[in-house]
Amino acid sequence: MNRFVQFAVAVTVSLSSGFAIAANLSVADIELQIQQKQSEFDNYNKNLETEVTASWLLEQELERLRSNSTALEQERQRALNEMNIQYEALIEDPALNIDSARQAYSAAVKDHKANKDAITDKYNSWQKQLQLVEQTRLAKHSLLNKLEGLKEQLNGARIDRLYREFGVQDTVQVSHNVSCDREETIAKCMERGKYLAKQKASKRFLDNVYSGLTESIEANMRRPYAEGYVQIIRSEVTDNSFSGLGDFAVSMAVELKGSLKRNEGCELLGLDRRYCVEQKGQEQVAEVRNPEADSDMTVSTDESVMYELTLRSNVFDDEVFIDGVSYGSTKLQIMLPAGKHDLEVVKRGYQTLMQTVDLKESTTLKVELTRSQYAFNKGEKIQDILAGDIPGPNLVVVAAGSYRMGDLTGVGLDNERPVESKTIPASFGISETEITVLDFQRFVTATSYVTDAEKDKGCAFYEGGQPVWREQLNWRSPGYTQKENFPAVCVSMNDAQAYADWLSDNSGNSYRLPSEVEWEYAARASKETDYWWGESVGVDNANCGWCGTQWSNVSSAPVGSFERNGFGLFDTVGNVWEWSRSAKSQSGSVVRGGAWNFAPRLARASTRMEIDQGFRANYIGFRVVREQ
């Protein structure tokens, strides 16, 4: 038997070992659960439509009774007047029979009272029905999150299955003939014949691996774009011979095993790359290609060559952004890689300067900012100092403009349609992060405000696919560890509005909660993709369930833990849902943006969840808007 041989053929797939599947469920198990949950969700949709219709009918009936009350009161008054006239006539003529007048009045009083009782009963029924609608809507959203979570698990399970199936080991019997060159030694010809036989065995084995995959059709479609390995465990020549014409024939038994890179399974199955990376804190991470080994890769800068950029401007307290990253104010000296860099200098009350700098040597730039004729400047940062020298929240100015609102990609929910063109007529300031625990603490300290959660019932948390109320939970103690720079949660829309009113009273400017039209405009930042950075949620771009961060499905994250969007706002995707006002919602309120324990599909720019203004949970917070 020949010695062991190691042999690699470039082809591959990958495993998402960072995606843990609950209770190690198989793909089939998860698909069955998805089918069951989808059926439940469809039933919830039908039930919600029925309950909303019943609520509307009760409201219409209540309005009819209230309208009828006026006519009945007029009839009661008319009967009373008639009876009084009859009584006056009875004084003059004691023999006069006034029974009909008394009976008419008695009937009018009875009808009026019956209508008032009916109004009370109908109002109580309507309120109960509204509560039922809200409960059904909450249950529907919870079920939707569970359904999306199962889909996340399904994709992870598909990658795990692919990895297991690709890692099979088998022995391939193969024969190969070669013609020996005249100048080739017998030993060289034999080695060449065995080498080509191993190549043939590897190709045959790999073809069998792909055809044996559960998702072989999907994987074979993308096979040319993925890389992988087949490892020869051992090889044995079972027969070989030379012909008189100088041909060498060899038969071999080759034992092979499929082997994978970590980042190729998603390529083969057409899944987002985040399913094929390790979670934070684990040892492995997604493989990064070596530019020297990939001729198709282009690099915009040569990071081995660094130059010094010195920047001066004609104003103080400006802010310099280079490639979207803030470097503070001028005068600024910084080392940057050679190549092109996007430069942006902003200051309140001045027009923003934007230009591209191509660094080929150490460079000094002097920029001139000109005063703006407008009160608000795009990208301008604002912070009001409140009464008592209390700092207000940091705001970013969002310029006026138009955009398309709703499900632009066709993957959204029914309440995201139809797509509508919207215009923001004037620029506005919006808090660059969600309102933090520290921001809210300043408000409570100044006003002794008591939140709805602290008054009654506490705050909801997400457990077993449902919002569960716990009396001791509130914005100070939401059920997980938080610090001052975490978003304030367990606040109702009423609490959020009270905070905005306090800002208005103490700043002299008008603060409020954003409308959902303004919210989506700011969150999209001129993009028409599902997330401001693209169509896929990717890895470590935001804190949402199954988004690959250290906080995913654990808790909210400190505000500003991820990149700003194009308008300079943090956390418009994930972290916590955010209150906004809506003309389309029956309660006048919706939450937007997704949360740390909700699936990525529910953190898209257009996702909207209608919730009663008094609801509060440890996954709902808010940000505020300041008008010019």
Image: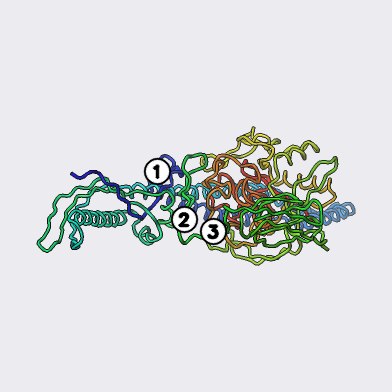
Callout 1, which amino acid?
A: Leu
Residue position for label 1: 25
Q: Depth check: 294 or 345 in front? A: 294
* Residue 306: % across, % down: 62, 52
Callout 3, which amino acid?
A: Val
The residue positioned farthest toward the left in the image shown? 244
Q: SS class of the residue under badge 1? A: loop
**Residue 355, above or below 134:** below
* Separation of marks 3 and 1 at Cα, in angstroms: 42 Å
* Separation of marks 2 and 1 at Cα, in angstroms: 40 Å
Quarter where residue 468 is shown: top right
Residue position for label 3: 299
* Residue 2: % across, % down: 20, 45
Indicate left or right for 306 with 1 as reference.
right
Q: Which mark is residue 292?
A: 2
* Residue 270: % across, % down: 43, 57
Picture colour scheme: rainbow
Q: Earlier in the sequence, mark 2 or mark 1?
A: 1
